[in-house]
Image (tube, helix red, strand yellow):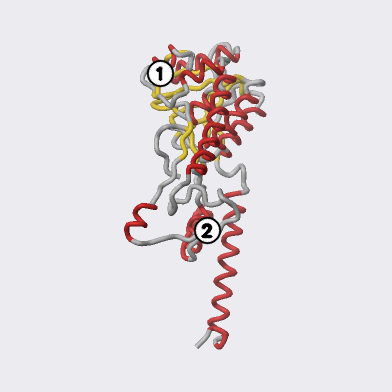
Amino acid sequence: MGINKHPFLSGLFFLAVFVGIFAIFIYFILFKFNAKSNYEVVRGSSNNAIGIIDLTGTITSSSGFIRLLEHYKHDPDVKAVIVRVNSPGGEVAPSQAIYEQLMKFRKQKKVVVSMDSVAASGAYYISSAADEIIAEPGTLTGSIGVIMEMPNFYKLMKKVGVSYNYIVSGPYKDIGTPFKEMTPMQRKKLQGVVMNVYGQFVSAVAKGRNLKVSYVKKLANGMVYSGQQALKYHLVDKLGDFQDAVKAAQKLAGIKGSATLIYPVKKQPNLFQSFIKRAVKSFVGSIGGSAFFKNPAFVSYGSARLDF
């Protein structure tokens, strides 16, 4: 009894497909392509303002950070930006994108980084783009290095008698698969990728901190440093808290007296947006497409294990 013999069931099926596609379309319109929908800026009326941007948690995206930075860049009342960092690092590309935008931003306005509990790896990469870095004595920072992590189930599968067949267009197309033992040549190639990205990391820190590459390499062994150690090694400029960062930003920007601090506030989606988001995730999950909403990556800055 096929579906073609029952027009009613056939109609329901195609209606469900249409609704699913339409819901996905609405999701992208509301959540992916609306660049101004995620944050709003709460501020006073002072023409001497300092913009605040929080960099917290694992770095997986640069879009929100860069949108706020662009807002502050075009606001004539904003004289400087403070980036409050509390992050262990994250993915390579977003870290590089934020670093590059901060380097461009500081040609027009001042940038101060205020480090909290941790500002390591990719978070330090980003911090090095600031005009001045202020850390707590016990802040964990540094961890200049690159790690590539790939799980491997080859031995387990061999033990239970399960094999995996591959048909590839080249010797490196299946590189890094967890179901096959990595060849020495594949490992060598991946090591080359890691060292290339490592060189980019070292060069970026040297440029941002105005240090010699040879000096940064001595510190860039993946080791994490306390804020006090980082000050000694010239990885940060001063020890202090957020209020010290505010004073530093005022001084760098030439602000006399007090300055208005501008904090971005994340908007809460309305009920319609929330309903559409839940409906789309439920639909995509039901057809085995939950990975559609994920942002996988397997190269990250830092020595700590990161789950993507």
Is the C-beta separation of discs 1 and 2 under 8 Å?
A: no
Provide residue 202's location: percent of width, then percent of height: 54, 24
Residue indicated by mark 2: 276
Q: Nearer the viewer, mark 1 or mark 2?
A: 1
**Residue 274 or residue 163, whichever sits in front:** 163
**Residue 203 or residue 280, whichever sits in front:** 203
Left or right side of 107 for 4: left
The dot on residue 179 is none
Classify 10 Å Cα crowding around label 2: few (below 14), some (14-19), many (20 and above).
Answer: some
Residue indicated by mark 1: 227
Name the kind of residue labelled 1 in the image.
Gly
Name the kind of residue labelled 2 in the image.
Ile
**Residue 86 or residue 187, whichever sits in front:** 187
Provide residue 6's location: percent of width, then percent of height: 54, 86
Question: Considering only order in the chain, which callout, 2 or 1, is on the residue closer to the N terminus?
Answer: 1
Q: Is residue 169 above or below residue 19?
A: above
Provide residue 117's location: percent of width, then percent of height: 38, 26
Provide residue 305's location: percent of width, then percent of height: 40, 38
